[in-house]
């Protein structure tokens, strides 16, 4: 009888611990992510912090830095605050699934001139620097597992505010982000 009681107590203890672990996964509110495609494609690093306010809403900011500022990518540095609204029926972990994002963006960058020489190929010449703001919308999908690993696909665009003649009229926002929720 003592063995059965001990076994039942052990099972109840383990199941209570497992339920506590699941509850703690739901209560995780902070995410850090890094953009995988930009990092693999070139020397552009974009890191993101996101705070989960509720199961349907989060906000945060992304910071981008271009380590090779002589390339054809127009952004040298940008900071992008955002707010996201999630639309997912299963909300076990909250702030996952399909989302719509509104963002603002401040960009320090450069315009460039592209030339082509048949012997050398394409070359990019840095022309003028600019500082500009932009606002835009993005769509995305986020997956998260029980341990907190996050995979996120994001695509969007923003319109430049103001009349800087060297800045692009629009900016792309997107990447395949990999991160962790804690």
Image (tube, rainbow, N blue to C red):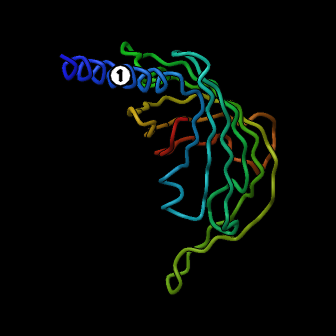
Local packing at callout 1 (Cα closer than 10 Å; few below 14, some 14-19, many 20+) is: few
Q: Position of residue 163 (x, y in %)?
A: 81, 39
- In this orientation, which residue lies closer to the viewer: 180 or 135? 180
* Residue at the extreme top: 89
Q: Which quadrant of the figure contains the C terminus?
A: top right
Local SS, label 1:
helix
Q: Is residue 175 left or right of residue 111?
A: left
- Which of the 4 image quadrants contains residue 84? top right
When the figure is inspected, residue 23 is found, relative to residue 30, above or below; the finding is above
**Residue at (49% x, 37% y) in the render:** 155
* Image point (64%, 70%), residue name: 124
Residue farthest front in this picture: 2
Residue that badge 1 annotates: 13
Using residue 22 as the reference point, say whether residue 2 is left or right of it: left
Q: Nearer the viewer, residue 117 or 67?
A: 67
Q: Which quadrant of the view contains residue 61? A: top right
Q: Is residue 34 above or below residue 86?
A: below
Question: 119 above or below 98?
Answer: below
Q: Is residue 97 above or below residue 167?
A: above
The picture places residue 86, in percent across and down from the top left corner, at 49, 19
Q: Residue furthest bottom?
A: 119
- Closest to the observer: 23 or 179? 23
Residue in the picture at 44% in, 40% down: 149
Q: Quadrant of the N terminus?
A: top left
Location of residue 54 in the rendering, given as x and y in whole percent from the top left corner: 57, 16
How many numbered markers are drawn?
1
Q: Find residue 105 and report its image quarter.
A: top right
Q: Residue at x 61, y 33 (%)?
A: 50
């Amino acid at each position: 009888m003592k063995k059965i009681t001990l076994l039942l107590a052990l099972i109840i203890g383990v199941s209570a611990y497992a339920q506590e672990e699941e509850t703690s996964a739901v209560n995780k509110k902070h995410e850090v992510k890094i953009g995988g495609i930009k990092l693999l494609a070139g020397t552009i690093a974009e890191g993101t912090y996101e705070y989960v306010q509720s199961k349907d809403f989060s906000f945060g900011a992304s910071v981008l830095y271009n380590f090779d500022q002589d390339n054809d990518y127009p952004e040298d540095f940008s900071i992008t605050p955002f707010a996201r609204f999630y639309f997912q029926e299963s909300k076990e972990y909250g702030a996952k699934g399909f989302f719509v994002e509104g963002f603002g963006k401040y960009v320090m960058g450069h315009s460039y001139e592209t030339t082509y020489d048949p012997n050398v190929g394409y070359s990019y010449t840095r022309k003028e620097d600019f500082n500009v703001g932009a606002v835009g919308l993005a769509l995305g999908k986020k997956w998260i597992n029980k341990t907190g690993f996050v995979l996120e696909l994001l695509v969007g665009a923003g319109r430049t505010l103001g009349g800087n003649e060297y800045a692009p009229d629009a900016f792309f926002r997107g990447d395949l982000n990999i991160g962790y929720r804690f």
